[in-house]
Amino acid sequence: MVRFLYLAKASLLTAKRYSIDWYGNVLMPILGVLPVVIAVWYGNKIGFLDFSHVVGTQRFFEYYILGIAYWNYIEAVWTSIFALREHMKIGQLEELLLTPIKPWEYILGWSFLAISLTTMGSLPLIIIALVMSIFHLSIETCVLAVFIFLTSMIASFGFAFLIFGLTLVIREGDEIVSLLGNAAPLLGGLYFPVTILPTPLLIISYVFPFTWGIDLLRAVFLGSKTIFSFKTELVLLSIISIGYFGMGVLGYHILEIKMRRRGIQGF
Amino acid sequence: MVNLNGIITIAKKECKIQLRYRVVWLNFALTPFFMLAPWVLTARMFSPNFGEAVLVGSLMWYWLNQYFFGVQESFEEEREEGTLISIALAPISLLDFLIGKGLWILVECIYITGITMLIFWVLGISQATSFQMFSLYLLSGLYMFAFSILWGALVLRFRRIAGINFITQELLGIASGVTANINSYPQMIKSVAYIIPLTYTIRIGRGILTGKTLLDVAPDLIMLTIVTLLYFSIGVCLLRRAENNLRVVGGWEAW
């Protein structure tokens, strides 16, 4: 049960030797969204449009903070794929697969560092938001938010399992994560409501669990308008998340069997 | 003296490796769109012209992004796999090695830009996706490549700065006015912007987009060439020093 902690410890010790990466990991999510924030700032400065009716709230700061914090946690789980790929490249994968560690332990152990960094990176922003009394918290909103967050994380693990398995067979899992990681914020509505996306992208975003997760979290904390009714979105998030998790676990098992039959030499 | 055969051999080697990986081409085709679309679509909500201007800046920034990652990986990946020492023993200078890698990145960037322009054209962005603009992106990319040699030299000398590559690119992009006009920036940021080559390529690109002639943008083109040459010269000197340092103290395979 606690074996994943050894992997987490190994990741932490390795990361300690590369302290400059910490700054990169902590600042990257904020800098990633900054060009959009600057576009909004510049757009408003030259007075083209009141952006608030597009995002459904005038509280842009909170809108983006919530989005960034949420996405950071979702994507943190997927960093385990990069660790897997690195072990493939440096020729350590076979040894790792001979250990009694299970796949979920690898995913959890390798993503532990990213989750810790995300917590460190997001906390200052969340504290600022709390100090400024941005979020109107109550026990009910907290319980709801935790439920939405954990359900989203289940979906994220589903993705991680599937890509982990794919990496063992087609090897290019890091490319899939890279594509997914870049597509997800747009398709999931990190920057603006997905309803303004062109129809083909909108369809993809609707089957994406994180679209509902972020929409619900914003509704809980900021009182913003949801795409469908709150209840409908909650049900959708739960069903899709469990579906992705089941598909991920099943997919992993099939792909692992395939990998063990075919062998995994080379990268 | 440039070792042309060596450069082409490195580029061919990269080509053969990359062609073995299929998913990477799908990633190349779609990731730039997903990355740049939030910037462009946000700007387009304000005005179509603003959207076009942001696409010009974004695509030029993406070339910088590819070259910064590309030159870094040229050293980083070879180091991790323990093959950088073979490069050091080969009859090719590290500059030629980087140029060879850069030649292949040029092919990748042409593919990336072509597909990304096509997707944005389908979404209704027409001016920034014209053939004339494509030539400008290509020209801008060559300047970005020359600029990125400095980053490659820094990575070779101080290998751990690789961890702040994306931050550096983001800061360079923001300061250069990828999603805004730098004229609206505070004076201090504006001063920084004028020493970044990307600022000039974006100004030239947006100038041509709004109908300026080559003569109108000539001052920016001259400044771009001067600033880039300066960074390129510093980069080449640092690269030689880093190479000499490695030959004396070792550490080719350490990362």
Image: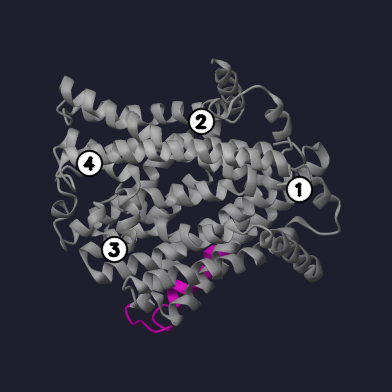
- Chain of residue at mark 1: B
The mark nearer the N terminus, 3 or 2, is: 2
Q: Which residue is mark 3?
A: A199
Provide residue A173's location: percent of width, then percent of height: 57, 46
Instruction: Please name whichever residue, A163 or A19, is drawn nearer the observer in this view of the structure.
Output: A163
Residue B224 highlighted magenta (yes or no)? yes
Q: Are marks 4 and 1 in contact (CB under 8 Å)?
A: no
The part of the chain drawn in magenta is B210-228
Amino acid marked by disc 2: Ser
- Residue B111: image quadrant is bottom right
Disc number for residue A111? 2
Q: CA distance from mark 3 to mark 1?
A: 53 Å
Q: CA distance from mark 4 to mark 3?
A: 19 Å
Disc number for residue A233? 4
In this picture, residue A44 sits left or right of residue B199: left
Q: CA distance from mark 3 to mark 2?
A: 34 Å
